[in-house]
Image (spheres, rainbow, N blue to C red):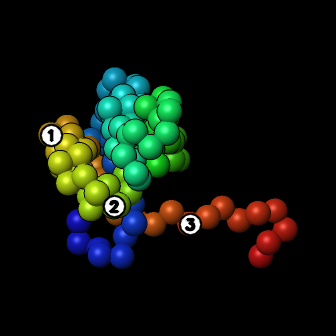
């Protein structure tokens, strides 16, 4: 991770050799494990454990399952950050850095 301005890390469900990672629900499972790590801690509101952490969100990009990991997780919970990054490394998943841009609303140029 070399870009100090990147705000997110994208763990893609594609291995370094180009194969689709299995099981198909890997992104939801990983984000579920990470749901307790959030701004203010897990106990900041009732039922927080029932939702994904804003620091670790599963999604689909261009037809590929992805987990978006916010770099704030690294500062707040270094061991959780290491867990997620080691998951990607151990499973030889493609990882890239970036910053999500807000979607443009209809009619904006």
Query: Closer to the camera, 11 or 37?
Result: 37
Q: Are marks 3 and 2 in contact (CB under 8 Å)?
A: no
| Spatial CA span between label 3 and label 2 | 15 Å
Image spot of residue 3 (x, y percent): 29, 74
Query: Crowding at label 2, few (<14), some or many (≥20) Cα neighbours within 10 Å?
Result: some
Residue 17 placement, left or right of 105: left
Quadrant where the C terminus sits is bottom right
Which residue sits at x=36%, y=46%?
Answer: 41
Residue 14 placement, left or right of 58: left
Q: Nearer the viewer, mark 2 or mark 1?
A: 2
In the rendered image, which quarter is residue 93 located in? top left
| Spatial CA span between label 2 and label 1 | 20 Å
In the rendered image, which quarter is residue 106 located in? bottom right
Which residue sits at x=32%, y=26%?
Answer: 22
Helix, strand or loop at label 2? It is loop
Helix, strand or loop at label 1? It is helix
Residue 21 sits above or below residue 38 on the image: above
Residue 74 sits above or below residue 101 on the image: above
**Residue under numbered circle 1:** 90
Which residue sits at x=41%, y=26%?
Answer: 25
Image spot of residue 57 (x, y percent): 45, 44
Q: Looking at the image, tell me whether mark 3 or mark 1 is earlier in sequence order.
A: 1
Inspect this view and state whether residue 10 appears. Answer: no
Helix, strand or loop at label 3? It is loop
Which residue sits at x=50%, y=30%?
Answer: 47
**Residue under numbered circle 2:** 71
Q: Which mark is residue 22?
A: none
**Residue under numbered circle 3:** 101
Image spot of residue 8 (x, y percent): 39, 60
């Amino acid at each position: 991770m070399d870009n100090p301005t990147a705000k997110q890390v994208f763990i893609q469900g594609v291995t370094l050799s180009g194969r689709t990672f299995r099981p198909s629900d890997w992104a939801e499972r990983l984000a579920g494990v990470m749901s307790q790590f959030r701004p203010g801690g897990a106990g900041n509101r009732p039922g927080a454990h029932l939702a994904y952490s804003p620091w670790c969100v599963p999604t689909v990009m261009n037809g590929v399952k992805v987990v978006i990991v916010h770099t704030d997780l690294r500062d707040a919970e270094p061991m959780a950050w290491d867990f997620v990054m080691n998951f990607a490394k151990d499973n030889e998943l493609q990882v890239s850095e970036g910053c999500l841009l807000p979607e443009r609303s209809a009619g904006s140029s």
